[in-house]
Amino acid sequence: QVQLIESGGGLVQAGGSLRLSCAASGRTFSSYTMGWFRQAPGKEREFVATISRSDGTTYYADSVKGRFTISRDTAKSTVALQMNSLKPEDTAVYYCAAGLVVTVEARRYAYWGQGTQVTVSS
């Protein structure tokens, strides 16, 4: 079992920045690929970014590429999502997830946090 707890969400104006953090506990953090997903009201959960467990390779959704950066700190068992140049369309609940493969498919991630709200005002 892996427990994930997100933090760092909040309200920010368009063009601003936020940094989300996800703390993992339980089984070995380094064994898992970590991902961030988001879900806006009335929409399906969508992939945002992922970072591999092996060499730290990262992948991003086209909608956030160049603005968001995912990183992991194995020593602290945390994964972060730095979000810059935020847009109103980035408003959503953001979820941290852990899985065994690098994928954009939410169903392939076995463990999920409770989510943190990000609201970007125009």
Image (cartoon, rainbow, N blue to C red):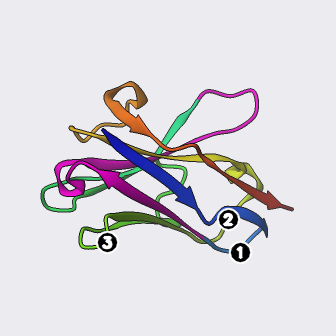
Q: Residues within 10 Å of mark 2 (few under 14, many from 20)?
A: many
Secondary element type, mark 1: loop
Residue 13 seen by the camera: no
Magenta stretch encompasses residue 27: yes
Q: Position of residue 89 (x, y in %)?
A: 72, 49
Q: Residue at position x 13%, y 56% from top?
A: 54
Tell me, yes or no, whether the two marked residues, 2 and 1, touch with CB atoms within 8 Å. Answer: yes
Q: Quadrant of the C terminus?
A: bottom right
Measured from the top left, where is residue 55 in percent x and y? 14, 61
CA distance for labels 1 and 3:
27 Å
| SS for callout 3 | loop
Which quadrant of the figure has residue 13?
Answer: bottom right
Residue type at numbered disc 1: Gly
Residue 40's disc number: none
Return the residue nearer the eye: 30 or 47.
30
Q: Label 2, on which residue?
A: 86
Give x and y (percent) for residue 7. Answer: 58, 62
Q: What amino acid is at disc 2?
A: Leu
Q: Determine whether, in the image, residue 57 is placed left or right of residue 110.
A: left
Instruction: Give the residues drawn in magenta, as a range.
Output: 19-44
- Sequence order check, earlier mark of 1 and 3: 1
Front residue (pair 102, 122): 102
The residue at which mark 1 appears reads as: 16
Specify few, some or many for label 3: CA neighbours under 10 Å numbering under 14, 14-19, or 20 or more: few
Image quadrant in which the N terminus is located? top left
- Residue positioned 24% across, 41% down in the render: 102
Query: Going from the N terminus, do you reach mark 2 or mark 1 first?
Result: 1
Helix, strand or loop at disc 2? loop
- Closer to the chain start, of discs 2 and 3, is 3
- Which one is closest to the eye, mark 1 or mark 3? 3
Task: Identify the residue under disc 3.
Answer: 76
- Say if residue 109 shows up in the picture: yes
